[in-house]
Image (cartoon, helix red, strand yellow):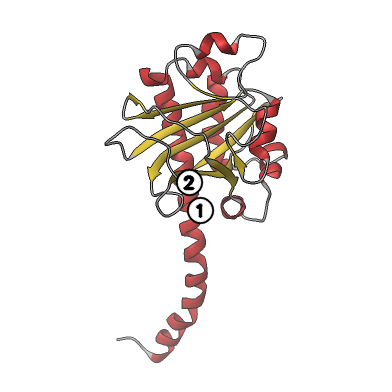
Amino acid sequence: MLTRARFLGAVALLPAAMLVSPMARAQSSQQVTIDGARKVLADLRHDKAFGNAVQLMRQAKAVLIVPKLVKGGFIVGGEGGNGVLMVRRRGGWSDPGFYAIGAASFGLQAGLEQSELIMLIMTQKGLDGVLRDQFKIGAQAGISVVTLGSSVEGAIGGASPPDIVVWSSSTGLYGGLTVDGSVIRAEPNQDAAFYGHPVTARDVLFGPMESPRAAPLRREMNSIG
């Protein structure tokens, strides 16, 4: 039998539980994105659709990984997804900063509703562009973006490599993704939820941030090179 004292005690705990629950859900969603990024890296190693992306990643200054690019995922009638951006530092890859990418249409192949995406940022100019607020691909003069394919490997070794190389895979198929016009934006609310306090994307990418929950993803990135 529930006594009055026990009932009142349970009621008193409800506000605290209600405050904790949204944060727990938010942290869980960021962890899902990070775990999804690890899966993309595993696919990168074994999925032939990713071609020479592993070799190119070893030369990249930063990498944006979007585990699930979906129709209707960014704005009403648009397409997009959540991902993580990591930059190469002297001691290895940084902790992940949370980003979103979206567009009116990415031109996914007919019948495909979602795709994995990797954006290899090859030059400092490309990284500076992505770090701008609301970076729009194709709108910034002088930043070249190419789709990863058999012809890109030779281009990387040229005198003027592309600034950004994009690759997508949909269940083992080349996604044929076109990203011109898509918007990349930082997600500071997700960063704050994951790291436990307000933080900017630059703090995460270039500061001393090291979350134990991001350690498995960092190890995966460092193992690739």
- Up/down of 162 relative to 3, above or below: above
Residue lying at 49% horizontally and 82% vertically, measured from the top left: 12
Report which quarter residue 137 is drawn in: top right
Amino acid tagged 2: Gln
Q: For this rendering, which residue is in front, 143 or 133?
A: 143
Amino acid tagged 1: Gln
Residue 109 drawn at (x, y percent): 33, 32
Residue lying at 48% horizontally and 11% vertically, measured from the top left: 151
On the picture, is 133 further left or further right than 101? right
- Whether residues under marks 2 and 1 lie with C-beta atoms below 8 angstroms apart, the answer is yes
User: In the image, which disc is placed on residue 31?
Assistant: 2
Residue 116 drawn at (x, y percent): 41, 33
Residue 157 drawn at (x, y percent): 61, 9
Which residue is disc 1 drawn over?
Answer: 27
From this viewpoint, is residue 88 visible?
A: no
On the picture, is 143 further left or further right than 67? right
Q: For this rendering, which residue is in front, 76 or 81?
A: 76
Q: For this rendering, which residue is in front, 2 or 62?
A: 62
On the picture, is 22 further left or further right than 171? right
Direction left: furthest residue: 111
On the picture, is 48 further left or further right than 89? left
Disc 1 packing (10 Å; few <14; some 14–19; many ≥20): some
- Up/down of 22 relative to 221, above or below: below
Report which quarter residue 207 is drawn in: top right
Residue lying at 62% horizontally and 24% vertically, measured from the top left: 163
Secondary structure under the numbered disc 1 in the rendered image: helix
Disc 2 packing (10 Å; few <14; some 14–19; many ≥20): some
Position of the N terminus, as image quadrant, is bottom left
Secondary structure under the numbered disc 2 in the rendered image: helix
From this viewpoint, is residue 8 visible?
A: yes
Report which quarter residue 178 is drawn in: top left
